[in-house]
C-alpha cells in the first residue's frame, strides 16, 4: 500500500529535511511552501474525496498566508477525510490559544526544534492503525 505524506513549511531548509526524512521512511511526499490541498486549489466548499488523500500531514504553524492551524481548521470545516490525529503542527512559536485549539481538535503538536525521533514515534503510532495510508 502506498504511503503518502504532505509537508507544508515556508522555510525551505525545514521543508527539505522533512521531505528527505519521510522519503527515507517510505513515503511518497508532496510538499508546499504554503498550505494547500484540493480544497484550497479548487476553492471547493466540500471535500470531494471518498478516502484520505494523504496518510499524514506535517505542517509548520507560522506561515505568511495561513497558519498551519487555520489550514487544519479549513480542512475540517470542509469535510477533509484525513483524520485530524494524523495531522501534526510543528512550530517554534504557538500561542496558548492556538495550542488549546489544536489540542481540542486532536492534532499532534511538536515544538521547534523537535527531534526526528519524536516525529518517528508519532508516525509509528499512526502507522500502527493500518488504515488508508
Image (cartoon, rainbow, N blue to C red):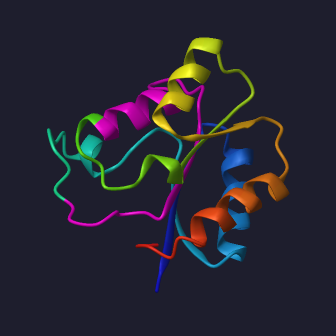
Residue 75 point in image, percent of width and height: 33, 40
Number of labels in the image equals: 0
Indicate the quadrant where residue 46 lies. top left
Residue 115 point in image, percent of width and height: 85, 49
Indicate the quadrant where residue 114 lies. top right
Q: Nearer the viewer, residue 18 or 53?
A: 53
The residue drawn where x is 48% and y is 38% is 34
Q: Is residue 105 left or right of residue 93?
A: left
Residue 120 point in image, percent of width and height: 75, 62
Residue 89 point in image, percent of width and height: 60, 38
Q: Is residue 10 above or below residue 128?
A: above
The residue drawn where x is 65% and y is 72% is 23
Q: Is residue 76 left or right of residue 128?
A: left
Q: Is residue 59 magenta?
A: yes
Q: Is residue 20 left or right of residue 75?
A: right
Q: Is residue 1 above or below residue 61?
A: below
Residue lying furthest bottom in this view?
A: 1
Question: Which residues are drawn in magenta?
Answer: 49-76
The residue drawn where x is 44% and y is 73% is 131
Q: Nearer the viewer, residue 12 or 119?
A: 119
Q: Is residue 30 magenta?
A: no
Amino acid at each position: 500500500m502506498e504511503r503518502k505524506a504532505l509537508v507544508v513549511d515556508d522555510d525551505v531548509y525545514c521543508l527539505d529535511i522533512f521531505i528527505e526524512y519521510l522519503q527515507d521512511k517510505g513515503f511518497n511526499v508532496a510538499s508546499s511552501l504554503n498550505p494547500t490541498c484540493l480544497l484550497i486549489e479548487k476553492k471547493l466548499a466540500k471535500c470531494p474525496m471518498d478516502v484520505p488523500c494523504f496518510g499524514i500531514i506535517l505542517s509548520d504553524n507560522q506561515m505568511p498566508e495561513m497558519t498551519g492551524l487555520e489550514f487544519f481548521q479549513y480542512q475540517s470545516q470542509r469535510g477533509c477525510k484525513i483524520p485530524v490525529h494524523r495531522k501534526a503542527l510543528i512550530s517554534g512559536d504557538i500561542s496558548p490559544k492556538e495550542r488549546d485549539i489544536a489540542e481540542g481538535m486532536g492534532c499532534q503538536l511538536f515544538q521547534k526544534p523537535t527531534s526526528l525521533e519524536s516525529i518517528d514515534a508519532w508516525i509509528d503510532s499512526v502507522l500502527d492503525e493500518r488504515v488508508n495510508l
